[in-house]
Amino acid sequence: MSFIFLLNLVLSLFAVGLIWTIQLVHYPSMKYIPEDRFSEYHNFHSIRISILAMPLMFTEMVTSIMLFYQNFSNASHIVFFSNLIMVVLIWCSTFLIQVPLHNSLSKEKDIEKLSRLVHTNWIRTILWTLRSVLMILFLVYTMDLI
């Protein structure tokens, strides 16, 4: 098992824990923040979560690209191609959907946009969960545990 694979797997599992916490706790709880404190809270949340998420996402992308190219000509290529596609889709969702919603919410509390943030964040939640399952299954398969 390569270090790159293990790092990618650990990042995936960490991301799953983080995204499920955001999906089930952080985003839904934003509706309870008073309007006069919402921008302050939202900016605090955005900065702090970025400290965790951005290095994780960047390293996850780099290791996913490395796994894809390192395994380009062997049977596990499809696993690492699928993994990379999921990471790219997570980035697309993040920067094309969630970041614009966060930018709008940083100015003012908007219940409709908060609801859209929660609903569209399921894209990332599902993708990160599937990615983790894929990588765990690959690990189990390659170690002859099944």
Image (cartoon, helix red, strand yellow):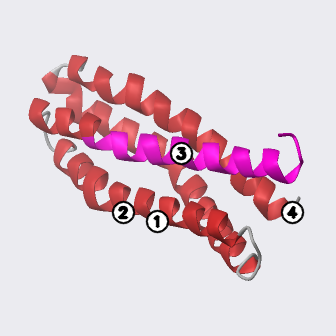
Amino acid type, label 4: Ser
Real-space Cα separation, disc 2 to disc 1, in angstroms: 6 Å
- Name the element at disc 4: loop
**Neighbourhood count class around disc 4 (C-alpha, 10 Å): few under 14, some 14–19, many 20 upward:** few
Amino acid type, label 2: Cys
Return the mark for residue 111: none
Real-space Cα separation, disc 1 to disc 4, in angstroms: 22 Å
Residue picked out by circle 1: 88
Q: Are marks 2 and 1 in contact (CB under 8 Å)?
A: yes
Residue picked out by circle 3: 130
Q: Are marks 3 and 1 in contact (CB under 8 Å)?
A: no
Magenta-colored segment: predominant secondary structure: helix
Return the mark for residue 92: 2
Real-space Cα separation, disc 3 to disc 2, in angstroms: 16 Å
Residue picked out by circle 4: 2
- Name the element at disc 1: helix
Q: Give whichever of discs 3 and 1 has the lower sequence position.
A: 1
Real-space Cα separation, disc 3 to disc 1, in angstroms: 13 Å
